[in-house]
Amino acid sequence: MTIKRRKFIQQSVAGTAMASTGLWACQPATNDEIPAAVVPQSSGTMPLVIATWDNFEATQAAAKVLEKGGSALDAVEAGARVPEADPNDLSVGLGGLPDIKGVVTLDACIMDDLGNAGAVCFLQGIKHPISVARKVMEQTSHVMLSGQGALEFALEQGFVEENLLTVSSKKHWEEWLKDQKPFGETNFENHDTIGILALDAQGNISGACTTSGMAFKLHGRVGDSPIIGAGMYVDNEVGGACATGVGEYVMKTLGSFLIVELMRQGKSPQEACEEAIKRIVKRQPKLYREYEVGYLAINKSGVYGAYGTEKGFEYTLYQDGENNKYPAEHFLKS
Ligand code: ASP
């Protein structure tokens, strides 16, 4: 494995560059000078797991980790792996709908309570991109690997390459090829992401996000889901947020980062999700009606929020020992 050596070289080069530009001559600010986050007191409880859409088995798998005293990081990875392995889930991992060329390409990211992050995008042939993203976070000095490089890294790490295009997802693609409706205009479920956030019994937050992206997208398209701050973001001082829906809108407003920063300023998770959706409405005054986005957020006190552009966005919540699906509030009232 060459990664350790590369890490050393990168650190040395970075160190030399900083020394020669005199950057190290500046005194860093101390932690005391950085303003503390405003985290509202509330009545939420921990542990807590929340996931986009009807992902009951995913939140259950995550809750199982937390109930045994496991970390939020292990919980979100365990949760995300459930739909990734499900061939009947058309928008995540194995069985995900392919791109315009019939190729299944996967995006995922993960963040822990220390602010570490890992991601993969345009990954092909590996069923569990979330676990590859975690390896990127833990085994390299990078945040994101893409395409062939991500695949080679995954294989080095012991992941097994397999065909992710199931008979059913191939059939959907062949149907779509017949009339090639533009991006977003298909009737059946043509996108969705599992974003999952957990708060463990120690009060630490982690998040994960994984998807096969928009169905029949252009070959090479990467959405919001692997982008730290867009598809998902965690700041353990404040809370976490994740997104589902048309990634282009989420990326253009850096939705998950925005939500966490709004919570830092004192907004509740619900208020922060609503404001992030309103930001999309403002930036895309016409298009937001056609293409859905949904956000989830949690804070350090175990309070959560959920909001979508339109009716239909739902989430699964595990809290106080109960695991249930709920409809989210939404901007468009009709
Ligand atoms: N956010 C995903 C993407 O744009 C798709 C989705 O969640 O619907 O790739």
Image: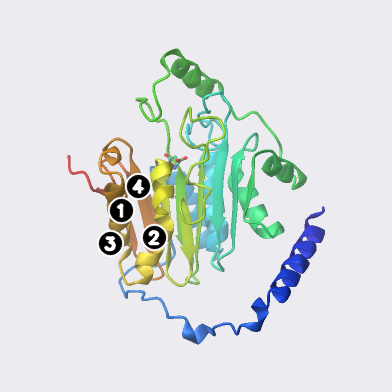
**13 sits left or right of 130 in the view:** right
| Residue 217 % position (x, y) | 48, 30
Secondary structure of the residue carrying numbered label 4: strand
Secondary structure of the residue carrying numbered label 2: helix
How busy is the neighbourhood of tag 4: few (under 14 within 10 Å), some, or many (20 plus)? many
| Residue 196 % position (x, y) | 46, 52
Label 4, label 3: how far apart the Cα atoms are: 14 Å
Q: Which residue is mark 3?
A: 271
| Residue 148 % position (x, y) | 69, 38
Quadrant of res 313: top left
Q: Indicate which disc, 4 or 2, sits on the residue closer to the N terminus.
A: 2
Identify whether 42 is placed above or below 288: below
Do residues under tags 1 and 4 come within 8 Å of each other at their CB atoms?
no
Label 4, label 2: how far apart the Cα atoms are: 14 Å
Q: Which residue is mark 2?
A: 258
Q: Indicate which disc, 1 or 4, sits on the residue closer to the N terminus.
A: 1
Residue 328 in view = no
**Amino acid carrying mark 3 in the image:** Glu
Question: Residue placed at 36% from the left, 51% from the top?
Answer: 295
Label 1, label 4: how far apart the Cα atoms are: 13 Å
Identify whether 75 is placed above or below 212: below
Dividing the image into four quarters, tell me where ligand 1 lies: top left
Q: Which residue is mark 1?
A: 279
Along the line of sight, which residue is nearer the eye, 272 or 60? 272
**Amino acid carrying mark 2 in the image:** Leu
Secondary structure of the residue carrying numbered label 3: helix
Q: Which residue is mark 4?
A: 294
Do residues under tags 1 and 2 come within 8 Å of each other at their CB atoms?
yes
**39 sits left or right of 18 in the view:** left
Question: Residue placed at 79% from the left, 60% from the top?
Answer: 4
